Image (tube, helix red, strand yellow):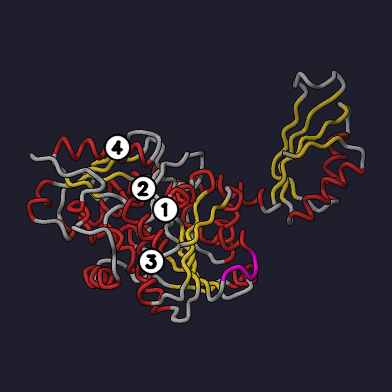
Amino acid sequence: MRAVPLDPFDLESYGGHLTVSADDARAAAEMLDGVITRTPVTESRALSTIAGTKVLLKCENLQRAGSFKVRGAYVRLARLSPEERERGVVAASAGNHAQGVALAASMLGIDTVVYMPVDAALPKVAATRGYGAEVRMVGSSVDEALAAARVEAARSGRVLIHPFDHVDVVAGQGTVALEILEQVPDVATVVVPLGGGGLVAGIAAVLAEVAPHVKVVGVQAASAAAYPGSLEAGRPMAGTLGATMADGIAVGLPGDVPFGIVQKEGVEVRTVTEDQLSRALLAVLERSKLMVEPAGAAGVAGIMAAGPGVFAGPVVAVLSGGNIDPLVLLRVVQHGLVAAGRYLKLQVRLMDKPGALARLVETIAAAGANIVAVDHTRTDVSLSVSEVSVNLQLETKGEEHRTAVVERLESEGYEVAAF
């Protein structure tokens, strides 16, 4: 089998050009008719209060395969030649693109191999295999998995289906913008999670042509944000990938196609912290009753971090995906509760005598906090013979209550360490 071209600057590998038009997105929408779900838009009163203007959520977390990725994946695969389909395809992803490619390939009858990082969420791996793809686990990031996929494409002749760096993929993602314009005709700002850039670029390309007054904002995880440095340099630059719960947007190098569009259309890029991501996920889950993954909540995090009056409304935040491991969800929710001041961990030293622990519990109850867990130990080397250490996990009602609980304990003479 012959190898496919892998040079990222080879125009043939992009379908002959590096731009995407509104007509490209419209053609993609026709191709996707009956394939994807037209996802709903729902208003969030809680976010509207925070932003000082009307905020709506575009629920791509409710899309087939759990994210917007199936849009671009299906368009890319459907446009392969019969000879390319016969060779099969190879892809790389932390999960959402993997599922999108696997689902699209199953509908089109194309043999698929997907490379995923070794720590990819187990439900995403299982779902990808469930759609019929062969999954190979390699590397610790999407970039390393993508490198392995390129090697496989060169070795076997399979067509590389890039997660974001192809005009067909970007055009497919741009169909989100067409739906937003129909569902929210007066939209003024669209806030979008940003990783490699396919979704942001597709939305920006369509809106720049059809509704140029609409502002597009991309939001990255601060610890994995390659776009700010790339935009400053004027070309895609590899960024440092730190630890982030938002694995779906943890991409170390922007794609040439999406970067060119993001740069040309003047997309504003913001970053959010891990605390902000977890608080956003918790807010969407608690107030809008919607399950999203951390990456999918990045746009909401950007709105919450910005506060009132920053974005012109109506604002549409794209919830890009809802594929989350329940164990990760448990940790993220707990993290979000801590960040929101509704969960407090304390270490308190007591004299080792009868009634000391009971008195501590009574003080906490009087302060209005609920004890979730207690760990009582006498063996810590930092303790004196007459002391015990008590680790407590408490539910609180917010930052003010959290502070009041600590102050109440300290006023009763307890030595408190919060962590």
The residue under label 2 is 95
Q: Please indicate whether residue 283 sits to the left or right of residue 142 in the image.
A: right
- The quadrant holding residue 371 is top right
In the rendered view of the protein, which quadrant contains the C terminus?
top right
Marks 3/2: CA–CA distance: 21 Å
- Of residues 164 and 346, which is closer to you in this image? 164
Give the magenta-colored segment's residue range: 307-311
Q: Residue at x 33, y 34 (%)?
A: 138
In the depicted structure, whether residue 313 falls above or below residue 378:
below
Within 10 Å of disc 3 (Cα), the crowding (few <14, some 14-19, many 20+) is: many
Compare marks 4 and 1 and give the one earlier in the sequence.
Answer: 4
The residue located at (81%, 53%) in the rendering is 368
- Asked if labels 3 and 4 touch by Cβ distance under 8 angstroms, the answer is no
How far apart, in angstroms, are the residues tagged by discs 4 and 3?
Answer: 27 Å
Mark 1 lies on a secondary structure that is loop
In the rendered structure, which disc, 2 or 1, sits on the residue that comes first in sequence? 2
Label 4: which secondary element? helix
Is mark 3 in CB contact (under 8 Å) with mark 2? Answer: no
Q: Is residue 325 visible?
A: no
- The Cα–Cα distance between marks 3 and 1, rounded to whole angstroms, is 22 Å
Q: Give the residue at mark 3.
A: 203
The disc at residue 147 is 4
Q: Amino acid at mark 1?
A: Asn
Q: Which residue is mark 1?
A: 323
Among the two numbered marks 4 and 3 on one chain, the one whose residue lies closer to the N terminus: 4
Q: Earlier in the sequence, mark 3 or mark 2?
A: 2
Secondary structure under the numbered disc 2 in the rendered image: loop
Cα–Cα span, label 2 and label 4:
16 Å
Q: Are marks 2 and 1 in contact (CB under 8 Å)?
A: yes
Query: Which residue is most to the right?
Result: 412
Q: Give the residue drawn at x 35%, y 67%.
A: 205
